[in-house]
Image (cartoon, rainbow, N blue to C red):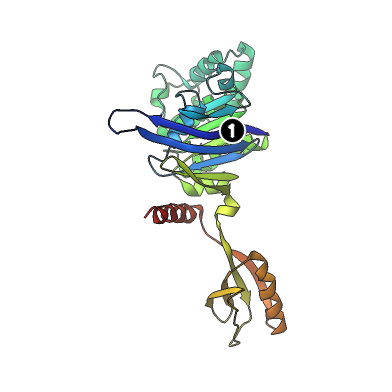
């Protein structure tokens, strides 16, 4: 089931500074499944924040449409199904951690017993039980992120919007928050994750979308985005044996005594390579697709986009 759907979503800000306005979203169409962790990537000004705002009903779209659990974002009922941790959030200074969760529960019309039960569970989940009665102004940045995550989870939402959830959190805390996100996904819920830490997105996301100048440039699983298309590394006992590849099959990128890297014209051509190695009695140890990091994929995708605009 798709928990979030956008179809040809477009948002133009008319500021008077630019003729025709500023296009923040340009025909964005995505479908976020339930459950999954969906990473949202893009440089500054790509449209990530505007996409969050339109899905949360904070700003109206210019054209196209969006739904959350089948409801339009401007329907207040849709927001009861959403939890949100904004970037650079500011909670009321007079509140304690426990007080913030109680306030959040009341805003979602939760019963007193549900508020008590859920706040206790969430404080324990994010490791903040010891500081529940301390004022938020006394919290470190990492503690503020933890309590912020707890308040986003307070209504037991179907989908969670997280904007830089580990900003300012120490390495141990980042690991714990990643574990919380995966636990939420495993419980059947979805998360939209906006983070500049691409290694973090790579470690938890099921799928990723890359935005640039308001356009959706690429979307796919982390596996798809971090695998070089039709490139393979073959570990084998080549020694001094020659190994040629016809043009219709592909080309050698590199060849050493124990390793061959090839670029194929078609994924299925790897079977031809394996057959030829066996005919030459070259012992094969492993055959694996070339992997890159999500950061490398991100940079290459934006580079290809810029090259296509020149």
The residue depicted at 53 percent of the width and 43 percent of the height is: 175
The residue depicted at 64 percent of the width and 65 percent of the height is: 267
The quadrant where residue 29 appears? top right
**Quick one: quadrant of the N terminus?**
top right
Q: Is residue 130 left or right of residue 139?
A: right
Give the x, y percent position of residue 234: 62, 72
Give the x, y percent position of residue 219: 55, 46
Neighbour tally class for label 1: few under 14, some 14-19, many 20 plus, Cα within 10 Å: many
5 relative to 75, above or below: below
Q: Nearer the viewer, residue 51 or 159?
A: 51
The quadrant where residue 251 appears? bottom right
- Can you identify the residue that label 1 sits on? 5
The residue depicted at 48 percent of the width and 22 percent of the height is: 97
304 relative to 46, above or below: below
| Secondary element at tag 1 | strand
Does residue 250 show up? Answer: yes
């Amino acid at each position: 089931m798709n928990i979030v759907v956008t179809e040809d979503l477009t948002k133009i800000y008319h500021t008077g500074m630019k003729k025709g306005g500023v296009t923040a979203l340009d025909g964005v169409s995505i479908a976020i499944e339930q459950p999954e962790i969906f990473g949202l990537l893009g440089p500054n000004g790509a449209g990530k924040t505007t996409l969050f705002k339109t899905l949360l009903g904070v700003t109206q779209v210019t054209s196209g449409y969006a739904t959350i659990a089948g409801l339009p974002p401007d329907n207040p009922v849709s927001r009861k199904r959403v939890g949100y941790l904004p970037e650079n959030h500011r909670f009321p200074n007079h509140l304690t951690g426990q007080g913030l969760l109680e306030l959040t529960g009341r805003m979602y019309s939760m019963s007193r017993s549900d508020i008590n039960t859920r706040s206790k569970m969430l404080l324990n989940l994010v490791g903040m039980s010891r500081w529940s009665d301390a004022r938020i102004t006394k919290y470190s940045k990492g503690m503020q992120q933890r309590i912020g995550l707890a308040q986003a989870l307070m209504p037991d939402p179907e989908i969670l919007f997280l904007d830089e959830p580990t900003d300012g959190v120490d390495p141990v805390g980042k690991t714990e928050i990643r574990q919380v996100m995966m636990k939420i996904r495993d419980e059947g819920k979805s998360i939209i994750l906006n983070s500049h830490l691409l290694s973090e997105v790579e470690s938890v996301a099921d799928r990723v979308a890359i935005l640039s100048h308001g356009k959706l440039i690429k979307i796919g699983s982390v596996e798809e985005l971090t695998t070089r298309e039709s490139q393979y590394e073959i570990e084998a006992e080549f020694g001094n044996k020659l190994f040629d590849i016809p043009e219709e099959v592909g080309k050698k990128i590199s060849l050493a005594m124990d390793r061959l890297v090839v670029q194929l014209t078609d994924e299925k051509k790897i079977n031809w390579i394996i057959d030829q190695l066996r005919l030459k009695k070259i012992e094969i140890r492993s055959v694996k697709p070339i992997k890159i990091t999500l950061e490398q994929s991100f940079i290459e995708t934006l580079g290809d986009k810029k090259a296509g605009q020149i």
